[in-house]
Amino acid sequence: MKNHCTGVILAGGQNSRFFGTNKALVRVGGKQILDHIHDVFRDLFDKIILVTNDPPQYLQWDFNIVTDIFPIRSSLTGIHTGLFYSSTPYAFFAACDIPFLKKELVETLVNAIEPRIDIVIPETSKGFEPLCAVYSKRCFKPLEAQLAKNELKIQHVFQKVRVKKIPEDILRKSDPDLRSFYNINTPDDLAKAKNFATGPTEVTQ
């Protein structure tokens, strides 16, 4: 796993619904979200890349810090950039605002990589989770072509590459409550996450 897959954290969002506060640096359960993701990645990947347009905020971490190649603020841009700088055949991507990412779920996705597959993506009853998924370096050119046309929906690239969907029943074996996909977009999301971190209350997306 460590030799053929890089861990990439996407930290380029504008945090507009979070009053401009950097969500990656918010504390949940006594730990910054970015620290939690870093702890998971450090056990799984030899190489970790952080994609951000504000590098000085992250100099204390041992990341390869890179900035977007295309001057477009979107998740697709971050994935494209992460693949560009990755030196391994595959990269696992995670958004910077998921405080409950489970190592076992990441392992499930990375272990599902096959030579002829370009994307390994979770699929739950709520849909795909493209910001907690594996992408092959072969996705780089299709993503670049899409960005050149200003087509920013990640799922548009699915029609151009080979996709392996990991169904919910398999995902729940490593993350029974699917907490890994809980992301923080608003202060209300953060309040719920903090309540969950200190008690048994179930988190729902």
Image (tube, rainbow, N blue to C red):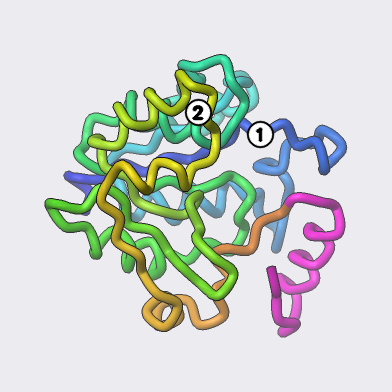
- In the rendered structure, find residue 77 and report the number of the disc placed on it: 2
| Residue 170 showing in the rendered view | yes
Percent position (x, y) of residue 180? 54, 65
Q: Residue drawn at (54%, 23%), measured in percent from left and top?
A: 150
Left or right: where 39 falls relative to 202: left
Left or right: where 203 falls relative to 1: right
- Is residue 43 placed above or below 152 in the rendered structure? below
- Which residue is label 1 attached to? 13
Please state, as top left, top right, bottom left or bottom right, where the C terminus lies in the image: bottom right
- Is residue 6 placed above or below 178 in the rendered structure? above
Q: CA distance from mark 1 to mark 2?
A: 11 Å
| Residue 91 showing in the rendered view | no
* Mark 1, secondary structure of its residue: loop
- Identified by mark 1, the residue type is Gly
**Is the residue marked by circle 1 packed among few (<14), some (14-19), or many (20+) residues within 10 Å?**
many
Start-end of magenta stretch: 185-205
